[in-house]
Amino acid sequence: MFTLSEHPHRRFNPLTNEWILVSPHRAKRPWQGEVAGTPPETRPAYDPTCYLCPGNARAGGNVNPPYTGTFVFDNDFPALLPDTPTDEPTDHPLFRVQGERGICRVICFSPRHDLTLAQMETPDIRRVVDTWAEQTLDLGGRDFIRYVQIFENRGEMMGASNPHPHGQIWSTMRLPREIDKELTAQHDYFNAHGVTLLGDYLAEERRRAERLVYANEHWTVLVPFWAVWPFETLLISNRAVPSLPALDDAERDALADALHQITVRYDNVFRTSFPYSMGFHQAPTDGAQHPYWHLHAHFYPPLLRSATVKKHMVGYEMLGTPQRDITAEQAADRLRQQSAVHYTRA
Ligand code: ZN
């Protein structure tokens, strides 16, 4: 008899049309729960050398205002520029090039240098949600911007250059690769079934109740069936809305609550400031309607067994297929068991 918790198997990701390999028998060893964790970071509330703190100077001579909530500015070292030529200067079909235009911004989540999303109060996270929605409208409203990617790299391990709580927005003329994949999958599913892929998926996950981590009235946090990162989660809006600006007041409060819940639990798993890359996947901003697109966020954390043992995508994963040992069900269990009170306050 085949069991998901025993036998090596492949799982299908219907959002990207890709398979992942699961090797549950390799995680059989008993959990050696690292209780020590790492001592809570002690950072000052204001750091005079931080280029994101209020009132401080940034590269290029800009000075941050004395902001008290969120603060958004154009990235001083942007990966994309709004005025790049968009030609396709291609002289051979195997050497294709496309000019790409875009606008990159930085969002400070809080004036407090010493906080993280996990340590911020929910009403303050709500202000971040509102800022994300405003930025989606502002950048998505430009005629050359077809996609607004909101994301956060948390922790040095994930390449965050500064511990000040902040995220980024890269908005582009063309759809990013992951969006392209999810668009095709969601579009085809909606055409075939008349409902959103994630709406159906959410209903089935609720019925099975094996991978749910947290739910409130408007948002659900779960470890997706096809998760590849050890404690990967998916945040799904219960109502099928295409993007952040479409969320009403109660749904925005609920999103702030869900973000608080999952980031606190992450920190509590290994009693450390849990690193991750997270981001929202919303509909393209090309002026068309996208009724098939169902707003969601992905958290991709690399920590595997402790505050220091990290998952790497190497070897077979680079050359073959992404693989995981801990099953989605085990990960959801561990996250669900965590306290909703941050370990530094418990
Ligand atoms: Zn997605």
Image (spheres, helix red, strand yellow):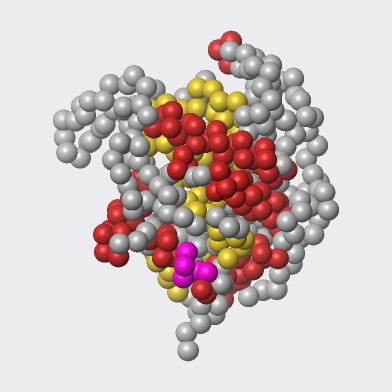
Q: Based on the picture, tell me whether residue 198 belongs to the magenta stretch.
A: no
Residue ID at (57%, 30%): 107
Residue ID at (34%, 53%): 292
Which quarter of the figure has residue 70?
top right
Furthest residue in direction front, as rendered: 249
Residue numbers of the magenta segment? 202-206
Q: Is 13 on the left or on the right of 337, as rendered? A: left
Percent coordinates x, y for residue 231 in the rendering? 59, 59
Q: Is residue 17 above or below residue 66?
A: below
Furthest residue in direction right, as rendered: 346
Mostly what secondary structure, the magenta segment?
A: helix
Percent coordinates x, y for residue 73 in the rendering? 54, 22
Residue 267 makes an appearance in the image: yes
The image shows a total of numbered marks equal to: 0
Residue 181 makes an appearance in the image: no
Please tell me which residue lies in front, 181 or 134. Answer: 134
Q: Based on the picture, tell me whether residue 205 belongs to the magenta stretch.
A: yes
Percent coordinates x, y for residue 7 in the rendering? 50, 79
Furthest residue in direction top, as rendered: 61
Q: Is residue 284 above or below residue 171?
A: below
Q: Is residue 94 above or below residue 45?
A: below
Residue ID at (64%, 40%): 125
Please tell me which residue lies in front, 71 or 38. Answer: 71
Q: Is 98 on the left or on the right of 260, as rendered? A: left
Percent coordinates x, y for residue 5 in the rendering? 55, 77
Residue ID at (42%, 54%): 240
